[in-house]
Amino acid sequence: MDLCDIQQIQALLGRHGFRFSKSLGQNFLIESWVPQDIAQASGAGAGTGVLEIGPGIGPLTAELARRAQRVAAVELDRDLLPILAETLADFSNVAVIPGDVMKLDLAALVKEQFSGLTPLVCANLPYNITTPVLTLLLESGLFSSITVMIQKEVAQRICAGPGNKDYGAFSVLCQYYAQAELLFEVPRECFLPAPKVTSAVVRLIPRPAPECVRDQAFFFRVVRGAFGLRRKTLLNALGAAFSLDKETLRGCIQAAGLSPEVRGERLGIPEFARLADAIQAAL
Ligand code: SAM
């Protein structure tokens, strides 16, 4: 069957008595070019094992299964399992894994499902868990690339550089772990039901941690502190985040080669790294 044909989808869902769940971020694809282009962009191919999060009724899963050696698709909604058993029946290289991706042992999954393969992620993510799921995937260090469809605004935040209005603590986190690229936009009309916002596909290619960062946990404390009070200067924002008097903090900011008047949104990873070292030395 055509898993993006709206009439066939409605008949399938009706036959199984399926009802959409808003809280599970269920917006299913109804334009076949979208799963085709996402699967193509993911790099799925011979020698790869692809983790998909939230297969829904399986349109992206099928495109991945046509390209990759193996696909493991984790689905939280148990009502979708009998539907997936039907729609993916022709693919012998797909394992549907019931469960919550946030609670799975990803390292064990990769070992069991993708032995000898290059592990990738490809998904049309449930939008309500975009930030925690991407953080989990990046921190895991398990995947060679992560290609996901998410809200366009979040995609722009992930890819924004210093000085851009969309740049924030999540941009720094993503760019610390990976090279991020916004690939293409997907209009609301491509989904059933249509979400309120435009979507976009981003590809994250993980890379080694930046050498300039010496203490990762402290670096991220400084980043969060600097963006915690977004409109404040570094001096005021970090004053609120660390128990350091203004004069000591001013000295740290200057020791890092920065102006106390500058805002966190102007700093890249090397500047944050210098600042973290200076503050840590003063504590
Ligand atoms: N891949 C399908 C498509 O493109 O048409 C469905 C995508 S829909 C945006 C998100 C899917 O993620 C739904 O099937 C939903 O049930 C599932 N989901 C939501 N939260 C999840 C979680 N924590 N773990 C695994 N799957 C989840």
Image: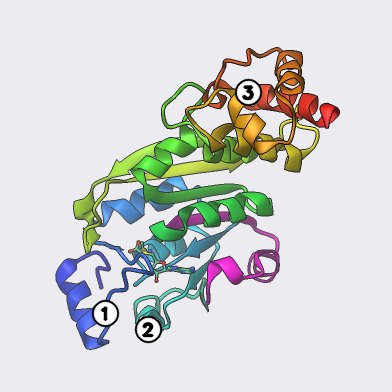
Amino acid at pointer 1: Arg
Observer able to see residue 118: yes
Q: Who comes first in sequence, dot 1 or dot 2?
A: 1
Q: Position of residue 133 (x, y in %)?
A: 53, 57
Residue located at (26% from left, 79% from top): 19
Q: Position of residue 25 (x, y in %)?
A: 36, 64
For the N terminus, the image quarter is bottom left
- Tell me the quarter of the picture where residue 207 sits: top right
> Is 133 on the left or on the right of 15, as rendered?
right
* Stretch of the chain drawn in magenta: 99-125
Disc 1: which residue: 19
Q: Are marks 1 and 3 in contact (CB under 8 Å)?
A: no
Residue located at (68% from left, 50% from top): 141
Q: Who comes first in sequence, dot 2 or dot 3?
A: 2
Q: How far separated are the C-alphas under marks 1 and 2?
A: 9 Å
User: Where is 129 relative to 18, above or below?
Assistant: above
Amino acid at pointer 3: Leu
Task: Let me know if residue 124 is in the magenta part.
Answer: yes
Camera-side mark, 2 or 3: 3
Pick the front one: 232 or 52: 232
Disc 2: which residue: 79
Residue 235, numbered label: 3
